[in-house]
Image (tube, grey):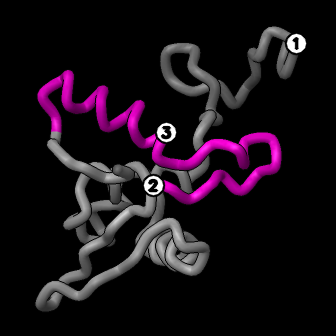
C-alpha cells in the first residue's frame, strides 16, 4: 500500500526512512554556516546535498532576511549567523533561531565536533 497513514510510500529512502526531512534546505544551510562560518559555497552545497546554485540562492535569502551577514576575508566569504532573529512562521515567531542552533551546536560539541559560538 503506497502513501498510507503509516507514512509508508514508494518515495521512502534507504533503511525505511522517509524521503522528506523536518528541516528545510534553508535550515540546513543555516546550520552548516553556524557550524563552520568559513565553508566555501561548494562545501555547504555538498554538506546539505543541494546544488551550488541553490546554495547561493539560499545564502542570498538568509542574508536579505538578516539571518546571516557575509564578510569578505581575502578572496573568501565568511558568514556570521544572527541567532537572535525570530523564526519566520507565526507559530514559531516567539522563538529565535539561536535556540535551534544551540541544539545542534551543543550536540556537535558533545560529540567532539567543531567549536563555534554561532547564534550566541
On residue 99, the disc is 3
- Residue for badge 1: 5
Q: Rate crowding at label 2 as few (under 14), some (14 to 19) or many (20 or more) other CA atoms within 10 Å.
A: many
Q: Classify 107 as above or below 54.
A: above
Residue 30, picture quadrant: bottom left
Per the model, the C-alpha gap separating discs 3 and 2 is: 8 Å
| Number of numbered tags placed on the structure image | 3
Closer to the observer: label 1 or label 3? 3
Residue 11, picture quadrant: top right
Question: x%, y% of residue 83?
Answer: 45, 54
> Is residue 22 in the magenta section?
no
Locate the N terminus and report the quarter of the image it occupies: top right
Question: x%, y% of residue 15?
Answer: 49, 15
Question: x%, y% of residue 9?
Answer: 76, 22
Q: Rate crowding at label 1 as few (under 14), some (14 to 19) or many (20 or more) other CA atoms within 10 Å.
A: few
Question: x%, y% of residue 88?
Answer: 71, 56
Residue 57, picture quadrant: bottom right
Q: Which residues are magenta?
A: 84-113
- Residue for badge 2: 83
Per the model, the C-alpha gap separating discs 1 and 3 is: 32 Å
Q: Are marks 3 and 2 in contact (CB under 8 Å)?
A: no
Q: Rate crowding at label 3 as few (under 14), some (14 to 19) or many (20 or more) other CA atoms within 10 Å.
A: some
Amino acid at each position: 500500500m503506497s502513501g498510507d497513514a503509516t507514512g509508508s510510500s514508494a518515495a521512502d529512502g534507504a533503511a525505511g526512512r522517509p524521503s522528506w526531512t523536518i528541516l528545510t534546505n534553508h535550515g540546513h544551510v543555516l546550520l552548516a554556516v553556524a557550524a563552520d562560518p568559513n565553508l566555501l559555497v561548494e562545501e555547504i552545497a555538498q554538506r546539505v546535498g543541494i546544488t551550488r546554485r541553490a546554495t547561493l540562492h539560499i545564502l542570498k535569502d538568509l542574508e536579505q532576511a538578516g539571518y546571516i551577514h557575509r564578510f569578505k576575508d581575502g578572496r573568501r566569504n565568511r558568514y556570521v549567523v544572527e541567532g537572535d532573529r525570530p523564526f519566520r512562521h507565526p507559530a514559531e515567531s516567539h522563538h529565535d533561531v539561536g535556540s535551534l542552533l544551540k541544539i545542534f551546536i551543543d550536540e556537535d560539541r558533545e560529540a567532539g565536533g567543531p567549536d563555534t559560538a554561532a547564534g550566541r
